[in-house]
Amino acid sequence: MVRIMKKNRKSAVFILSHGRPDRVKTVKLLEKGNYTGEWYIVCDDEDETLPEYIEKYKDKVIVFSKEEAKDLFDLMDNTNEKKVVVYARNYIFKIAEDLELTHFIVLDDDYTDIHYVMLFKIGKEEMLMKKSKKVKSLDKLFEATFDLLDETNALTIAYAQEGDFIGGINSFMKKGFKRKAMNSFFFRTDRKMEFMGRINEDVNAYVFYGIRGELIFTVAFLSISQLLTQTNKGGLTDAYKNLGTYVKSFYTVMLAPSCVKIDAMGVVYPRLHHVIDWEHCVPKIVSGRYKKR
């Protein structure tokens, strides 16, 4: 039974998982955060470990057909790699409609913590220091995020990842948001966001819709901690290893060559990665104070 939220809001959490029936860390995260709403683990019908999911999580498991899902979006290639999450990301809207949800959250299966992130001034020079505190009430946090989604009419809202803060505490947190969304997604069921490309589907989506002026945000003051992708077996790990970071990043270059390129990322161990020229990617948001009266 899906609970009815304020303003006639019906919501649930969907955890996307594949090949990790014994390591769905996000379920523990919801428990630690005192989440009381509905949640489901979404698996595909080609997962060899599906019986283990069903044995452990019973009716919390929702199974979808990859064959049916493939007609909902553009894979952007002709390879045969099917162990990717883009099928689930697109089919999830149909699941939400079938459950008669108004809002829903899509999470990966490897989250360990969600933190509030704050900035403090320290010392005589008033240097900025980032501090984090674990969220104790996910119910309140998720509801507040849905409120933000509705009030801003954004297409989707995401929480920051730890990597978002590397080398950019001052600029990112002072600004309060980035015009991107990865990994965690808050949606309205009636505002579908298509994910395209066999891999790098989240970057492809926020670039595709960002160019068209849709509002897509990563909130700076909330952060998700998760396991390192290529050290956690199952999920997308095989696809990342098979296709490589260069191929992964080039899907977005194919999608938007006017504002995306491949370049070296990192200092000690640099690797090829996509680089987005935000000046040429998204329309600017002009403050209301400049409106002519």
Image (cartoon, helix red, strand yellow):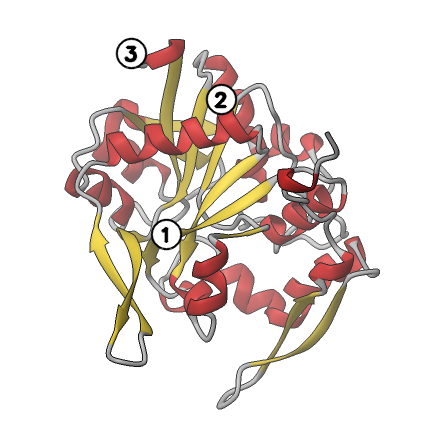
x and y percentages locating residue 68 in the rendered image: 62, 27
Mark-to-mark CA distance, 1 and 3: 32 Å
The residue at the point 45 percent across, 60 percent down is 174
For label 1, the crowd category at 10 Å Cα-Cα, with few meaning under 14, some 14 to 19 and many 20 or more, is: some
- Using the rendered view, name the quadrant where residue 214 is placed: top right
Numbered tag placed on residue 221 in the rendering: 1
Vertical side of 261 occupied by 82: above or below = above
* Secondary structure of the residue carrying numbered label 2: helix
x and y percentages locating residue 189 in the rendered image: 53, 21
**Disc 2 marks which residue?**
95
The first of marks 1 and 3 along the sequence is 3
Mark-to-mark CA distance, 3 and 2: 14 Å
In the visual, does 174 lie left or right of 51?
right
In the visual, does 179 lie left or right of 55?
right
Mark-to-mark CA distance, 2 and 1: 30 Å
The first of marks 3 and 2 along the sequence is 3
**Disc 3 marks which residue?**
1
Closest to the camera, between mark 1 and mark 3, is: 1
- Using the rendered view, name the quadrant where residue 265 is placed: bottom right
Label 3 amino acid?
A: Met
x and y percentages locating residue 181 in the rendered image: 54, 48
